[in-house]
Amino acid sequence: MQENKKIINYDGLYGDESGRYSAEYIFLESIASRSKDFDWHINPHVHIQLFQVFIIKNGSLSFQDAFESQTIEAPCVIVIPATALHGLTYNPPVEGFILTLSASIIEDIFQTSHPVWQTFEKIRVLQYFTEENLFDTMLTLLKHLEEELFSEQPERSLMIRALLTQFFLYTHRLTTQKNQWQGDSLQMGYFRRFQQLIKGASPHQSIPAFAEQLHISPVHLNRICKAVAGKSAIEMVHQNLIQEAQKYLLHTSHSVSEIAYLLEFEYPNYFAKLFKKYVGLSPVEFRRQDRR
């Protein structure tokens, strides 16, 4: 991949130009439901904040990452972390599912388990199911997940998190030396490292400070962010702040002013203005909408 070449990226699902990212985003669909509208061809692209798993039950496809294209036969599981370039051409009839969720959900589940988290840092193509009925077990978990996503059962969120934990632990167990994984291009490597630095830094660390940690110039960092995400470096920092704010609004009873303080904003009204710019709703409206 050429350095600084513009990359197609989506905040939401493939082809959704107006999609808005949410820290609690989870979506499960059949391969056919979206891919057939694009004549079974998905151009190479990235999702900046979304993690995806493709579960191929029957058929085959051509899978392209940042380096090469390969033909993959079912059954298989393809793990695609956020910011990983990928494109697919299906050979119908093909059957399977696509699980898409916020990368922050994976981080929240496995942040205390480094070996598991390492599994999901690279693209992985998993085709060797040594445990009997393991692939069927994973399909059953997806079926239960789908039922919970469209239900109003008590403690629905906890059940969804439990099902996701089981599914991704099985995925982790599939990662053996026989299974394939691909690395990042230099450009993607800088971008992914920048994302990691954002999560561990002070909420308002300057872009020059991030660039110094990466041993590149602020201008170069901005160019990389524009090429990969279509956003400036400061917009990436703001996006992470908004993600943290969403978690506070959804899972705590803190007031908007208290959340602004926790995120180190000097003025709550500036926090509210920034939140609305990225989400399209005020913090109060966002919280109210989720609790309807």
Image (cartoon, rainbow, N blue to C red):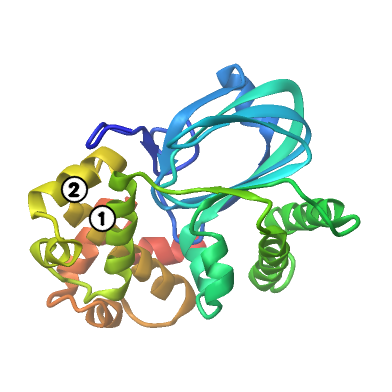
* Residue drawn at 53 percent across, 68 percent down: 117
Decide if residue 199 is in sight here.
Answer: yes
Decide if residue 291 is in sight here.
Answer: no
Residue 21 spot, x, y in % from top left: 41, 51
User: Which amino acid does the dot numbered 1 rest on?
Assistant: Met
The image quarter in which residue 7 lies: top left
Q: Are dots 2 and 1 in contact, CB under 8 Å?
A: yes
* Residue drawn at 46 percent across, 71 percent down: 250
Q: Residues within 10 Å of mark 2 (few under 14, many from 20)?
A: some
Which of these two is toward me, 276 or 56? 56
Q: Residues within 10 Å of mark 1 (few under 14, many from 20)?
A: many
Residue 87 relative to residue 190: left or right: right
On-image quarter of the C terminus: bottom right
Residue 79 spot, x, y in % from top left: 59, 49
* Residue drawn at 40 percent across, 61 percent down: 286
Residue under numbered circle 1: 236
User: Which amino acid does the dot numbered 2 rest on?
Assistant: Ser
Residue 12 relative to residue 219: left or right: right
Q: CA distance from mark 2 to mark 1?
A: 6 Å
The image quarter in which residue 201 lies: bottom left
Residue under numbered circle 2: 232
